[in-house]
Amino acid sequence: MFQIGEKIVYPMYGAGIVESIEQDFHGTKLEMYYIIQIPKNNLKIRLIANKSEQLGVRAVANKEEVEKALEHVAAKKIVMPENWSLRYKDNLEKLKTGRLDMVTEVVKNLNEREKRKKLSSIEKKLLNTAKQIVLSEIIYSYEIDTEKAEELLANLVLNC
């Protein structure tokens, strides 16, 4: 169970902070809810606490874990389907895992593809979403601002 003030990652939304924990009825059952503040787009999410693990919600990785994940992805060879719908499906599945290494892989793969060939608007949106998710975790893990997080991502993954 997460605590108030704990930094967490919610797949497809990114890193945020457990702002409060509330009790409320879900149908006829009394449930505990996390109220999560996601800074990106100033989003608040209300999530049934006992479903958080099933949804892939996890604690923000520490600096060493983040660096290890980024370096692992940087060293990986890019392999993507040429067919855009297969590529999109593959990248979306990686994004849904909420795993830092998988989401960073989406950023690296789509960034590299964009250098070679123009991305469709759907893939651009996917790249932006993935990048924001990775940046949000770097920001919380390293306790740095967006600009420094972008530099770190570029230095460790995108400019390799």
Image: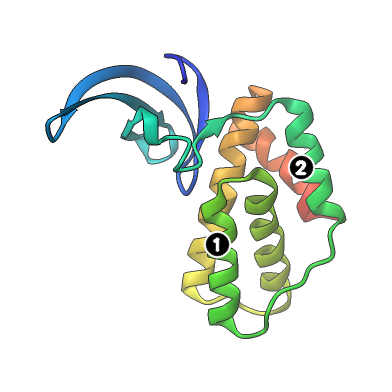
Q: Where is residue 33 in the image (x, y as percent from the top left)?
A: 30, 25
Residue drawn 65% across the image and 57% down it: 107
Left or right: residue 44 versus residue 101 is left
- Tally the numbered discs: 2
- Percent of width and height locating residue 105: 70, 57
Three-letter amino acid code of the residue under disc 2? Ala
Residue 17 in which image quadrant: top left
Q: How crowded is mark 1: few (under 14 residues within 10 Å), some or many (20 or more)?
A: some
Is residue 7 visible in the rendered image? The answer is yes
Front position in the image: 110 or 66: 66
Q: Residue visible at 70% across and 65% down?
A: 109
Q: Residues within 10 Å of mark 2 (few under 14, many from 20)?
A: many
Rendered image: mark on residue 132: none
Of tags 1 and 2, the one toward the viewer is 1
The residue carrying mark 2 is 69
Corner quadrant of residue 160: bottom right
Of callouts 1 and 2, the N-terminal one: 2
For the residue labelled by badge 1, is the local secondary structure a helix, a strand or a loop? helix
Which numbered marker is on residue 93?
1
Between residue 66 and residue 151, name the one nearer to us.
66
**Residue type highlighted by circle 1:** Glu
